[in-house]
C-alpha cells in the first residue's frame, strides 16, 4: 500500500539524531513488547501480516510513536483480526474465552512465521522453482500500486536496473500477508543507479541495491534490443520507444566496474 | 516492571498499561510463557550484539579462507564463530567495502537489521529521517556521520526482502600486525552498518586510556 511507511526518498523528516551509548531498550515495557512479539511469532503470526499491520497504522501515529509502540499496535491488531483475542479482552487484560486452537484470517494459512524457521532456509534453496532472471539481466521494476501489502517501494517502481544476485526462493509477501499463500519465487538483488532513481544533479556516484521478488520485475526489452543492436555489424534501430520513455539504453556494464572520467 | 527510572522520553503510562494487559491476557490464554520472555530479553541485552559482528569482521581480516567462506555463505560462517542464525540472521550476505565501493545498509520500508551479528538496531536506524535519506542522499547522510567517501561509489542496500546485509569494513591502515582480539576492538557497530569506519589503533588507545573521545 502507498502508505507513510514507504519512506525512501522523502524530505523534511529532520536530522538523524543519534544517542551516545544507547541502551538496547529504553524502558521495561519495550522489553516486554519485544519479547512478546518474538514469542508470538513462533505461534501465531507471519512476518508479512505483521509488517502489513504496522503499515496500516494511521500515518500521523506511524510517524510519531516509537518503534516498539508500532509493534504493540500490530500485535493488538493481529490478535483481534485473527480471533485470538477481543478488544475487550485487550482492554481488561483478562480472557473471557479460551484462545481458539487455530487462528483465522491472514494468520490461518498454515505458515507460521517461517522466516524464523529452518523450513525457510529449505525454501530458499528449492531447485524446483525456476529463475526467470539471472545476474546481469536488465530489468524494469513494475509500476504497481497495490492497496495491500507489497515490498516494492515507490521510489523503484517503473525504474530500470540490473540484476546483481539471485538470492534464492522466498515466500511472496504480497500474498502471504493476506493469507493468500506463499507463492514461492526467486528474489533478486537489483542495482538501480542513483541517477535513474532520482534524476540528474545528485551528489557523488550512488546506487541502490534493492531486493525484488520476481513478480515485481519485467525484462527491460528496450535495453535488451539495444544491446543486441550494438552487437550486430549492421546497426538497426532500437525498439520503438514512447516519447516519455526512460528507456534510454546504456551499455550493459555493471556499475561497480565503471570508472568515472575525471 | 516500572518505567519510573527511565530517563529517556517516558512513554505515556497508557502504553505501559496496554503492554501489561497484553502480556497478562496472552499468559492466561496460554499463548506465551513469561519465563521465555525473560530469556529473550536477556539474550538480546547480553548475548547478541555488535561485539558478535566485530568478531566476524576481525576473523575475516586475519583469515583469508574464513573471509572466502563468509562471502560464500555468511550465515554458516557466522555460526562457525558460535553465533547461531536466529531470527533476522538466517539469510545473510556480507558486503565488502573496497577502495572503490562504500556500502551502507538501510531498510526504507520498516527496520530490517542483521540481528545475529549486530543485535537490535539503534533508534536512529529505525527513524523516518534515516530511512528516507539513506537512498536519496547517502553522501550527505554519511557526511553527517563523519564518513567521507571521496569518489567511491556509495552502494546502498535497501533490505526489502528476508536477506540481511552487513558491511565488512576495510581494515584500518597499519594494523597488519595486530591480533584478532585487538582488531575486533576497532570494529564499531556503525562500521558494519556503513555509517562509520573502524577506529584507528591510536583512537582506540586514547579511549582505553580514558581520554575524552
Image (tube, rainbow, N blue to C red):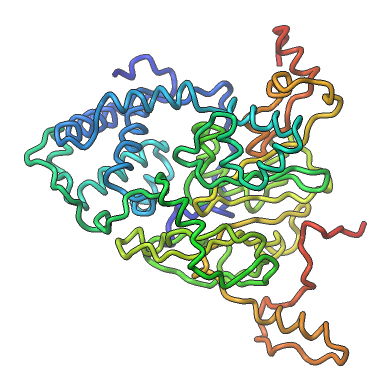
Image quadrant in which the N terminus of chain A is located: bottom left
The residue positioned 41% from the left and 44% from the top of the image is A116
Q: B127 and B178: which one is in front? A: B178
Residue B97 image offset from top left, x and y in percent: 75, 42
Residue A130 image offset from top left, x and y in percent: 53, 70
Residue A239 against residue B61 in the figure, above or below = below
Q: B177 and A10: which one is in front? A: B177
The residue positioned 64% from the left and 68% from the top of the image is A134
Residue A46 against residue A18 in the figure, above or below = below
Residue placed furthest toward the top:
B209
Residue A164 against residue A143 in the figure, above or below = above
In the visual, does A57 lie left or right of B77? left
The quarter of the displayed image where residue A8 is located = bottom right
Residue B95 image offset from top left, x and y in percent: 68, 45
Q: B176 and B113: which one is in front? A: B176
Residue A81 against residue B39 in the figure, above or below = below
The residue positioned 13% from the left and 43% from the top of the image is A99
In the visual, does B13 lie left or right of B28? right
How many marks overall? 0
Residue placed furthest toward the left:
A96
Image quadrant in which the C terminus of chain A is located: bottom right
Residue A233 image offset from top left, x and y in percent: 88, 89
Amino acid at each position: 500500500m502507498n502508505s507513510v511507511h514507504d519512506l525512501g526518498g522523502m524530505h523534511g523528516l529532520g536530522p538523524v539524531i543519534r544517542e551516545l551509548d544507547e541502551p538496547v531498550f529504553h524502558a521495561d515495557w519495550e522489553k516486554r513488547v519485544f519479547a512478546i512479539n518474538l514469542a508470538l511469532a513462533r505461534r501465531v503470526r507471519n512476518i508479512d501480516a505483521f509488517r502489513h499491520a504496522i503499515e496500516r497504522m494511521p500515518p500521523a501515529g506511524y510517524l510519531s510513536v516509537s518503534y516498539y509502540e508500532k509493534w504493540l499496535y500490530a500485535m493488538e491488531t493481529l490478535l483481534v483480526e485473527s480471533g485470538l483475542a477481543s478488544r475487550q479482552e485487550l482492554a481488561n487484560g483478562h480472557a473471557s474465552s479460551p484462545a481458539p486452537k487455530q487462528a483465522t484470517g491472514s494468520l490461518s494459512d498454515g505458515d507460521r512465521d517461517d522466516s524464523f524457521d529452518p523450513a525457510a532456509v529449505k525454501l530458499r534453496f528449492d531447485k524446483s522453482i525456476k529463475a526467470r532472471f539471472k545476474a546481469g539481466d536488465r530489468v524494469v521494476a513494475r509500476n504497481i500500486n497495490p492497496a495491500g501489502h507489497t515490498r516494492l517501494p515507490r521510489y523503484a517502481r517503473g525504474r530500470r536496473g540490473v540484476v546483481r544476485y539471485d538470492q534464492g526462493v522466498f515466500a511472496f509477501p504480497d500474498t502471504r500477508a493476506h493469507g493468500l499463500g506463499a507463492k514461492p519465487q526467486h528474489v533478486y538483488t537489483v542495482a538501480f543507479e542513483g541517477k535513474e532513481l532520482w534524476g540528474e544533479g545528485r551528489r557523488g556516484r550512488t546506487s541502490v541495491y534493492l531486493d525484488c521478488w520476481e513478480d515485481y520485475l519485467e525484462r527491460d526489452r528496450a535495453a535488451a534490443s539495444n544491446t543486441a543492436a550494438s552487437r550486430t555489424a549492421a546497426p538497426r534501430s532500437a525498439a520503438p520507444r514512447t516519447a516519455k520513455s526512460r528507456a534510454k539504453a546504456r551499455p550493459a556494464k555493471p556499475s561497480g566496474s565503471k570508472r568515472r572520467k575525471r | 516492571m516500572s518505567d519510573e527510572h527511565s530517563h529517556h522520553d517516558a512513554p505515556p503510562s497508557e502504553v505501559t498499561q496496554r503492554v501489561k494487559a497484553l502480556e497478562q491476557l496472552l499468559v492466561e490464554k496460554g499463548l506465551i510463557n513469561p519465563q521465555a520472555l525473560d530469556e529473550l530479553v536477556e539474550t538480546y541485552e547480553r548475548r547478541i550484539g555488535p561485539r558478535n559482528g566485530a568478531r566476524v569482521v576481525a576473523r575475516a581480516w586475519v583469515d583469508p579462507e574464513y573471509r572466502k567462506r563468509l562471502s560464500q555463505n555468511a550465515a554458516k560462517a557466522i555460526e562457525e564463530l558460535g553465533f547461531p542464525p536466529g531470527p533476522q540472521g538466517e539469510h545473510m550476505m556480507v558486503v565488502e567495502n573496497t577502495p572503490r565501493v562504500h556500502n551502507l545498509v538501510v531498510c526504507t520500508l520498516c527496520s530490517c537489521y542483521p540481528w545475529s551479528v549486530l543485535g537490535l538496531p539503534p533508534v536512529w536506524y529505525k527513524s523516518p529521517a534515516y530511512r528516507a535519506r539513506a537512498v536519496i542522499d547517502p553522501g550527505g547522510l554519511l557526511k553527517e556521520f563523519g564518513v567521507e567517501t571521496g569518489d567511491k561509489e556509495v552502494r546502498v542496500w535497501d533490505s526489502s526482502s528476508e536477506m540481511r546485509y552487513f558491511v565488512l569494513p576495510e581494515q584500518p591502515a597499519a594494523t597488519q600486525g595486530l591480533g584478532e582480539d585487538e582488531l575486533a576492538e576497532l570494529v564499531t557497530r556503525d562500521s558494519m552498518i556503513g555509517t562509520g569506519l573502524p577506529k584507528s589503533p591510536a583512537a582506540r588507545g586514547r579511549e582505553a586510556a580514558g581520554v575524552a573521545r
